[in-house]
Amino acid sequence: MRVGVLSLQGGYAAHSALLAGIGHEPVDVRTASALAGVDGLVLPGGESSTMLKLIGFSDLHDPLDAFVRAGRPVLATCAGLILAARRVTGPEQASFGWLDVDVARNAWGRQIESFEASADEGGLPLVFIRAPRLTRVGPGVTAVAHYEGEVVAVRQGPIVGASFHPELAGDATLHRLAFGDPGAP
Ligand code: GLN
C-alpha cells in the first residue's frame, strides 16, 4: 500500500523506514497533491501545536479532514493522536476529532521523564516522550494496548491511535494493524 507519512515536522522518517521494512511504500506528505496519491496515512509524533500551524500554512487542513473522513486507514502516534482526538487538554488545543477519545497533552511526563516500557499485554514496546494520556475512550473505540491498566493504544474502525512511539522501538505491530501486512519487500 502507498502509505503517506505527514512530514511537516517531528518523527516522520522512522515511520517511513518501518513501513518500507514491512513491504509498504512510504510517501512523504507535505502537500495536498501528495496526499491525493496515497491510500493510508501516518500522523507522526512531534509537537502537535507546531504541526497544526504547519498544516494551516500548507493548506492541508481540509484535504486531511476529507482524507480521513473518507474512511482511509490512519495510524496516529503521540502528537498525531493529539491531532486526531475529539478533545484536547493540558492546554486546550484545536483538533480534528476523528477519534472519539479525549487526551491530556504531556500527561505521561516531561521530556526529561521520557521512558520505555512494555504493554501490559506483553511484547509491545512502549516509548513515551512527553506523551498524551487518554482521559476518555468513547464507546465505539476499542483498546488495543494498556500500560499499568491505562489504555495507551486504540482502534476505531480504520483509525489506530497510540500515545507512544512504536516507530522508535522499531515495532511494526500497529503499522500492520492499520495498513495490513504485505510481507517483506
Ligand atoms: N507533547 C507533544 C505535543 O503536545 C507530543 C509529544 C510527542 O509527540 N512525542 O504535541
Image (cartoon, helix red, strand yellow):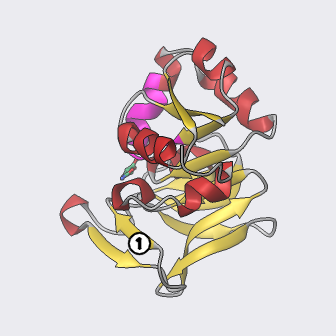
Seen in the image, is 91 located left or right of residue 161? Answer: left
Residue sitting at x 70%, y 32%: 39
Which quarter of the figure is the N terminus placed in? top right
Residue at (36%, 62%) from the top-left corner? 169
Residue at image point 47% right, 79% down = 123
Quadrant where the C terminus is found in the figure = top right
Magenta segment boundaries in residue numbering: 43-54
Where in the figure is residue 44, as x and y percent of width and height? 46, 43
Q: Is residue 36 visible?
A: yes
> Which residue is drawn at the image coordinates 41% and 54% (left, top)?
167
Q: Is residue 54 left or right of residue 176?
A: left
- Residue type beneath disc 1: Pro
Q: Residue 75 at what x, y percent from top left? A: 59, 49
Residue picked out by circle 1: 125
Tell me: residue 124, above or below residue 37.
below
- The image quadrant that residue 115 belongs to is bottom left
